[in-house]
Image (tube, rainbow, N blue to C red):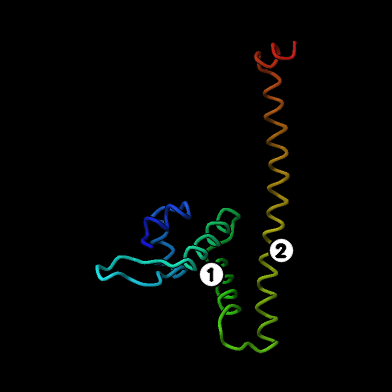
Amino acid sequence: MQIGEVAARTELSLRTIRHYEATGLVVPSARSQGGFRLYAENDVARLMVIRRMKPLGFTLDQIRDLLDATDRLDADGELGPTEREALLERVRAYEQAAAEQVEKLRVQLSRTEDFAATLRARLPEHEEATS
């Protein structure tokens, strides 16, 4: 698929996808005869990992590190048990960091909902609805 379809599916801008390509995070699977970038499903999946990690505060270097670890785990080549465990440990560390971010976001969401409810209670529309 071309970059426009990938942008629509991932909800990333063309500029962002091109930036991720320039930084080496994602490389189009092919190019058309006209030089257009062509992406496969695995490229879209890779962009979705990036899209999910970025708002959680992960740096591009951290994203690159995780993608490297998962790429090596997914590769057809044989990994020794020590190398495989080291890669899995890297993935576990990112999973733990993501879980910590989830908890922080839950707390933030709860506080925001409480704040919105406090404001809603002060509005005249709320007073009429409860009377």
Q: How far apart are the alpha carbons under marks 2 and 1? A: 17 Å
Q: Label 1 belongs to which residue?
A: 64
Residue 118 rendering spot, x and y as whole percentages: 71, 25
Residue 61 rendering spot, x and y as whole percentages: 54, 68
Tag of residue 96: 2
Q: What residue type is disc 2 on? A: Gln
Of 117 and 60, nearer the camera is: 117
Which badge, 2 or 1, comes first in the chain's sequence?
Answer: 1
SS of the residue at dot 2? helix
Q: Quadrant of residue 35?
A: bottom left
Residue drawn at x 41%, y 61% as measured from the top left: 19
Residue 42 rendering spot, x and y as whole percentages: 49, 68
SS of the residue at dot 1? helix
Q: What residue type is disc 1 on? A: Arg
Q: Quadrant of residue 95?
A: bottom right
Residue drawn at x 24%, y 67% as measured from the top left: 34
Tag of residue 111: none
Query: Is residue 17 left or right of 85 when viewed as pictured?
Result: left
Badge 1: residue crowd in 10 Å (few <14, some 14–19, many ≥20): some
Note whether 21 is above or below 76 in the view shown. above
Q: Quadrant of residue 109?
A: top right
Residue drawn at x 52%, y 64% as measured from the top left: 45
Note whether 108 is above or below 42 in the view shown. above
Residue 126 rendering spot, x and y as whole percentages: 69, 17
Note whether 49 is above or below 128 in the view shown. below
Q: Are marks 2 and 1 in contact (CB under 8 Å)?
A: no
